[in-house]
């Protein structure tokens, strides 16, 4: 059976060595040494500062909205995993959908302004399948209307825009480290927070607002990453260059194969960005062709998925 995704598991001996040390120390959560190490290593690898590790990517989104004290309407895309929208609704915010660019699959920045009202508080674009949004154009719109930007960069691990990490754009970018991702911690995620003061506040927020053994200085929740997640991340990070190179070979094989097939369109990639080869989406000429291909693949024990389906505005 060939499934649409396959989790990369690192060298088991490397992972077990970390786990043995956790058992020896007895420190399994609450900002342990491996969470600290993973945070430092990821900041260095990604070229960012103020990276905050959390237990999953959905909580990263929720923390971002709460941290920026958003209220009212938030402009976003209907073409994403459900968490992009459900996290907004969970926090009492109203998603306002802007259609995507049919070639890039990312939010069409040219259609954002027409959806802005006096209730609009923020824009939540998605770097779909790791394809970078038009970040400079979105930035101009946000500045014009004094809006916050939270990038759902769940797919965008290691993506650079004009040579700099795309995670530096917006007020906050969030990453998912779910097991299906290029880099993962089994479950997990991160926020990259531009403002130093907000970063310090977020550090308290993910641990109940606690600042000391007898001190709670604000509203918080439990969103901490634990040591077992962190050592999976460290083990994967040790192998990330090989992982990306392997994915690149497979990706280029597919690109060459699909050049010969009529009725198939590939995602138009942002020329200012690199590729982490996390996904290979193909667009069919119509739904009938898609369903026929899906049926024929499944008959051969190959199980693709309709990503993303259904559209979140429905």
Image (cartoon, grey):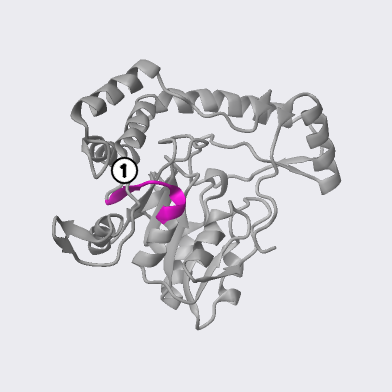
120 on left or right of 51: right
Above or below residue 9? Residue 267 is below
**Residue 202, horizontal then vertical, whole percent:** 29, 59
**Residue 24, horizontal then vertical, whole percent:** 21, 25
Q: Residue at (46%, 53%) from the top-left corner? A: 58
**Span of residues in magenta:** 50-60
Name the quarter where the C terminus is drawn: bottom right
Name the foreground residue: 114 vs 206.
206
Name the foreground residue: 253 vs 128.
128
Kindly give the residue lying farthest to the bottom in the view shown: 118
Q: Residue at (40%, 36%) from the top-left corner? A: 185
Residue labelled with disc 1: 47
Tell me the quarter of the picture where residue 213 sits.
bottom left
Q: Looking at the image, can residue 286 be seen?
A: no
59 on left or right of 130: left
**Residue 193, horizontal then vertical, whole percent:** 32, 57
**Residue 300, horizontal then vertical, whole percent:** 78, 24
Disc tally is 1
Q: Secondary structure at mark 1?
A: loop
Above or below residue 34? Residue 147 is below
Q: Residue at (51%, 49%) from the top-left corner? A: 132
Is residue 312 part of the magenta span, yes or no?
Answer: no
Above or below residue 166? Residue 116 is below
Name the quarter where the N terminus is drawn: top right
Q: Looking at the image, can residue 245 be seen?
A: yes
Residue density around tag 1, few if under 14, some if 14–19, many if 20 or more, within 10 Å: some
């Amino acid at each position: 059976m060939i499934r649409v995704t396959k989790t990369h598991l690192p060298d088991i001996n490397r992972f077990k060595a970390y786990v043995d040390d956790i058992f020896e120390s007895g420190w399994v959560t609450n900002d342990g040494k491996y969470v600290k190490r993973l945070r430092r290593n990821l900041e260095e690898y990604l070229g960012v500062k103020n990276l905050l590790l959390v237990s999953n990517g959905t909580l990263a989104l929720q923390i971002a909205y709460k941290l920026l004290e958003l209220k009212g309407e938030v402009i976003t895309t209907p073409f994403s995993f459900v968490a992009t929208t459900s996290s907004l609704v969970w926090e009492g915010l109203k998603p306002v959908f802007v259609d995507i660019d049919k070639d890039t699959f990312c939010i069409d920045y040219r259609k954002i302004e027409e959806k802005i009202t006096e209730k609009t508080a923020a824009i939540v674009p998605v770097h779909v399948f790791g394809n970078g949004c038009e970040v400079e154009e979105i930035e101009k719109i946000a500045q014009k209307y004094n809006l916050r930007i939270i990038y759902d960069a769940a797919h965008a691990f290691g993506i650079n825009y004009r040579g700099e990490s795309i995670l530096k754009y917006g007020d906050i970018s969030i990453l998912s480290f779910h097991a299906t991702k290029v880099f993962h911690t089994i479950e997990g995620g991160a926020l990259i927070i531009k403002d130093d003061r907000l970063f310090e506040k977020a550090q308290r927020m993910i641990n109940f607002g606690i600042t000391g053994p007898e001190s709670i200085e604000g509203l918080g929740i439990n969103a901490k990453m634990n040591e077992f997640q962190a050592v999976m991340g460290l083990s994967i990070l040790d192998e990330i260059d090989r992982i990306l190179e392997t994915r690149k070979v497979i990706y280029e094989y597919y690109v060459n194969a699909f050049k010969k097939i009529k009725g198939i369109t590939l995602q138009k990639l942002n020329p200012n960005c690199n590729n982490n080869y996390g996904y290979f989406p193909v667009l069919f000429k119509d739904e009938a062709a898609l369903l026929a291909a899906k049926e024929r693949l499944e008959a051969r024990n190959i199980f693709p998925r309709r990503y993303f389906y259904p559209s979140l505005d429905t």
